[in-house]
Image: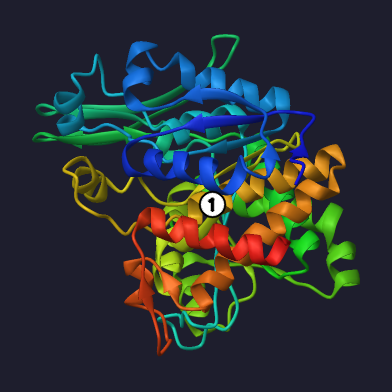
């Protein structure tokens, strides 16, 4: 069978630990036999990031802006223990945070659902998509460990040198901690439009939540911008599609979500979206069954797994032990990127390939062949637990039967 030809490359961002191993397995067994894969490759493994003083992460993000579609493996965000383990020059920031800041996008995370995987929340019958604003807030904050008594102040000076705001944050009488964070109107506007467009494209209701009763400037700005854009640009289009947008406080939203049947988009600020996407993924089954795509306002897409680097399995793998690591989210990152590349370049074969590979992976699980984590959750009488590579090879077998 002739391989599917690509015209424009994907930006490929390799990663760390067990997900790096899975990344190579997926390429070798599930993509390269069928697609004449063209990528612009960036190694975002922690060692290479340290060698380049993290410039390679910025280069990868700029490449996504150039080519329009990227696919990223999970990466380590180093802490003090990783500093020692990898003998790093400094404690680098999250690669995801760096890429998201450069692309100024919105992250949409949706669980991969199957009939045999019942959500922990009994009322949920349809997936819930988390739309996470992927800019600023705590991920780009300035922090300070206050060493002794003193006064913390916040001041804003405009570009002409005029002090427009100068206020005491707190008079410390003892040591403590201090943090300042920010956001921008244009980024919040992009976030709002991305959410409204995604809701229209998927014909789903859109919910948005913050805590504006407490944060009367910061969170209230998010609320006001969303409402203004909706009223001016989207209200009529939503009504024509028979879908709804509404705002509520985040604590009320949590209660509504738990009581709902699912099937909607829940838009959250950066930190809220980070936490709530993990909650939704876990309730639906596993972070390894969660798709994630970053959509930028100028039409760039970056696909990745929603989970981390699976450190515990990596050390077992290094010790020569057998692992049973779920590769579904990483596989769906690849299929999502290939599908979008096919759509943008008008290559129907590539779109069909991505669709069929996803169907094959889902059928493999539904037929009872799965990794250990899903075997503990799946509502099936006959289950066969496969190791990491064994599951990928079983998906290939299923795909060949579908495509053949």
Residue 48 relative to residue 320: left or right: right
Q: Give the number of callouts.
A: 1
Q: Residue at x 46, y 88 (%)?
A: 122
Taking depth in this image into account, of 147 and 141 the one nearest to the observer is 141
* Above or below for 82 versus 207: above
* Above or below for 389 versus 151: below
Residue 246 relative to residue 135: left or right: right
Pinpoint residue 167: horizontal percent, then vertical percent.
38, 30
Q: Quadrant of the C terminus?
A: bottom right
Taking depth in this image into account, of 145 and 74 the one nearest to the observer is 74
- Secondary-structure class at tag 1: helix
Asked if residue 209 shows in the view, the reply is: no
* Above or below for 304 versus 396: above
Q: How is the image coloured?
A: rainbow
Label 1 CA crowd tier, 10 Å (few <14, some 14–19, many 20+): many
Residue 178 relative to residue 306: left or right: left
Pinpoint residue 56: horizontal percent, then vertical percent.
47, 17
Q: Residue at x 53, y 61 (%)?
A: 395
Instruction: Please identify the residue farthest to the front as the structure is shown.
Output: 1
Residue 395 relative to residue 204: left or right: left
Asked if residue 82 shows in the view, the reply is: yes
Taking depth in this image into account, of 289 and 208 the one nearest to the observer is 289
Pinpoint residue 233: horizontal percent, then vertical percent.
85, 53
Q: Residue at x 67, y 45 (%)?
A: 34
Pinpoint residue 347: horizontal percent, then vertical percent.
84, 43
Provide the residue designation for mark 1: 331
């Amino acid at each position: 069978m002739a391989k599917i030809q690509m015209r424009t490359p994907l930006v490929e961002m390799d990663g760390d630990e067990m997900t790096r191993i899975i990344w190579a397995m997926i390429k070798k067994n599930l993509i390269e036999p069928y697609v004449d894969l063209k990528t612009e490759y960036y190694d975002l493994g922690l060692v290479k990031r340290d060698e380049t003083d993290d410039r390679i992460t910025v280069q990868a993000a700029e490449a996504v802006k150039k080519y329009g579609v990227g696919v990223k493996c999970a990466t380590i965000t180093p802490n003090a223990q990783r500093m020692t383990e990898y003998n790093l020059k400094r404690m680098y920031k999250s690669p995801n945070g760096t890429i998201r800041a450069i692309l100024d996008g919105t992250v949409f995370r949706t669980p991969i659902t199957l009939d045999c995987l019942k959500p922990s929340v009994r009322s949920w019958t349809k997936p819930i998509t988390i739309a996470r604003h992927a800019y600023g807030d705590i991920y780009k904050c300035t922090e300070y460990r206050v060493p002794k008594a003193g006064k913390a102040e916040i001041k804003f000076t405009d570009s002409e040198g005029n002090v427009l705001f100068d206020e005491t944050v707190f008079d410390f009488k003892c040591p403590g901690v201090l943090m300042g964070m920010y956001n921008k109107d244009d980024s919040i506007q992009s976030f709002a439009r991305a959410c409204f467009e995604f809701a229209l494209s998927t014909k789903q209701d859109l919910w948005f939540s913050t805590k504006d009763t407490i944060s009367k400037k910061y969170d209230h700005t998010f609320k006001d911008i969303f409402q203004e854009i909706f009223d001016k640009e989207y209200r009529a289009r939503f009504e024509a599609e028979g879908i709804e947008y509404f705002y509520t406080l985040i604590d009320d939203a949590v209660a509504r979500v738990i009581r709902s049947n699912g099937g909607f988009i829940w838009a959250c600020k950066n930190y809220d979206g980070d936490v709530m996407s993990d909650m939704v993924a876990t309730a639906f089954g596993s972070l390894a069954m969660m798709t994630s795509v970053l959509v930028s306002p100028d039409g760039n897409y970056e696909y990745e797994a929603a989970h981390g680097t699976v450190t515990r399995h990596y050390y077992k793998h290094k010790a020569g032990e057998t692992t049973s690591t779920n590769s579904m989210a990483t596989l769906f990152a690849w299929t999502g990127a290939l599908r979008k590349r096919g759509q943008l370049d008008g290559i129907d074969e590539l779109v069909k390939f991505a669709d069929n590979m996803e169907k094959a992976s889902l059928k493999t699980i539904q037929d009872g062949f799965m990794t250990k984590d899903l075997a503990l959750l799946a509502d099936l009488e006959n289950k066969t637990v496969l190791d990491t590579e064994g599951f990928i090879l079983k998906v290939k077998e299923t795909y060949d039967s579908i495509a053949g």
